Image: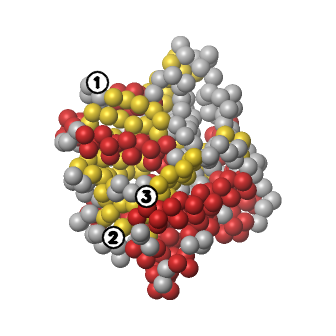
Amino acid sequence: MTIGIDKIAFYTPNYVLDLVTLAKARGDEPDKYTIGIGQNRQTVVPNFEDVVTMGANAAIKIITADDREKIDLIIFATESGIDNSKSSALYMQTLLELSEFVRTIELKQACYAGTYGLMQARDYVATHPGRRVLVVASDIARYGLSTSGEVTQGAGAIAMIVSEAPKIVSINTDSVYMSRNASDFWRPVDRQEALVDGHLSTDIYKEMFLTLWQRYQLKTNQQLNDFAGFAFHLPYTKMGKKALDQIINEATLAHQQKLTHHLKASQKFNREVGNLYTGSVYLSLLSLLSYATDLKSGDKLAIFSYGSGAEAELYSVTLQNGFENHVPAKMTQQLLLKRQLVSVNQYETMFKSQLYDSHININSNAVKDTKLFQFLGWHNGERVYR
């Protein structure tokens, strides 16, 4: 049975900050942001958006009546959860009008949980032929104003439907993975902003990628020339280049050029959105499929997923016949093009406006006349959505 990603969609809020503008406001050279870390813009999150609304706004693009009949499991991956007990998947079940005869679960392990969710979805479909799983990876990267991590903020959600006979990619059973207790990034329950050691995180990311690549080669006998491209977890786009540079000389010169070209294709969407934690690697995959026009069915792509703290996995997917007809390239491009550019002052105001105190009944700045799902605010300690 061939199992994999049958549909994929992306959503990010409608507000965006230009990083050249931010660099000037912070007294930094713009090249430090646009070249040094490889980012152009980052999503700014209004207080009527959260991981639930973003996930639902992504998923609604791909869910059909047939999917509603066949989805029996919703897996919601996030490190920006809204409740210490109740799964974000339950709120999505209601917003998307899915059956109550489904399992709803939330997963957490930094930026890695979306990949574990995808693997669990694949295994579920393998033992439940004909059924489908909705996997959502939704996050808000938040480090604080004028901090060292500010330039790697961002937000968004990737939604994927996993099924047999997938239209886009099959997920191969060749994973290698590892975990290590490391203090490169964490977010205590009493903090809204993450704590991070950026240099340590970069070092562990590169080390884990190289270790898993070597382990993968031993396990599968695959070589670098066997892959048409890579999708990397991209907290900032330069990170993927740092990883690939460690092994690029293993390929022929012609294939090195191809991999480098495809790496740039895989970075385009992420450059315009910023970091979205659990969804980052799958936005990179979507970007690769959208911009690498020479990919063909049967090509293998490598996926490297990393979550600080730290856990990583390397595996491959295979492009299916006609995959290009099911990749929402134009839809994603249009979503990014129509966003509203905000000033640094507007960004800072929106950053400070988030509603974290459940003890106060308060309305968000939700807008009228929209078909998008929104967080309306708090009422008696409950989050209210429409």
Q: Nearer the viewer, mark 2 or mark 1?
A: 2
Q: Secondary structure at mark 1?
A: loop
Q: CA distance from mark 2 to mark 1?
A: 38 Å
| Label drawn at residue 226 | none
Q: Earlier in the sequence, mark 3 or mark 1?
A: 1
Viewer-proximal residue, 85 or 38? Answer: 85
The answer to whether 188 appears left or right of 62 in the picture is right
Res 195 visible? yes
Q: Are marks 3 and 1 in contact (CB under 8 Å)?
A: no
Res 280 visible? no
Q: Residue at x 61, y 28 (%)?
A: 355
Q: Residue at x 62, y 61 (%)?
A: 206
Q: Is residue 77 above or below residue 271?
A: above
Q: Is residue 83 above or below residue 243?
A: above
Q: Nearer the viewer, mark 3 or mark 1?
A: 3
- The residue singled out by tag 2 in the image is 299
The answer to whether 380 appears left or right of 169 in the picture is right
- The residue singled out by tag 1 in the image is 100
Q: Secondary structure at mark 3?
A: strand
Q: Earlier in the sequence, mark 2 or mark 1?
A: 1
Residue reaching furthest right?
A: 27
Q: Residues within 10 Å of mark 1 (few under 14, many from 20)?
A: few
- The residue singled out by tag 3 in the image is 315
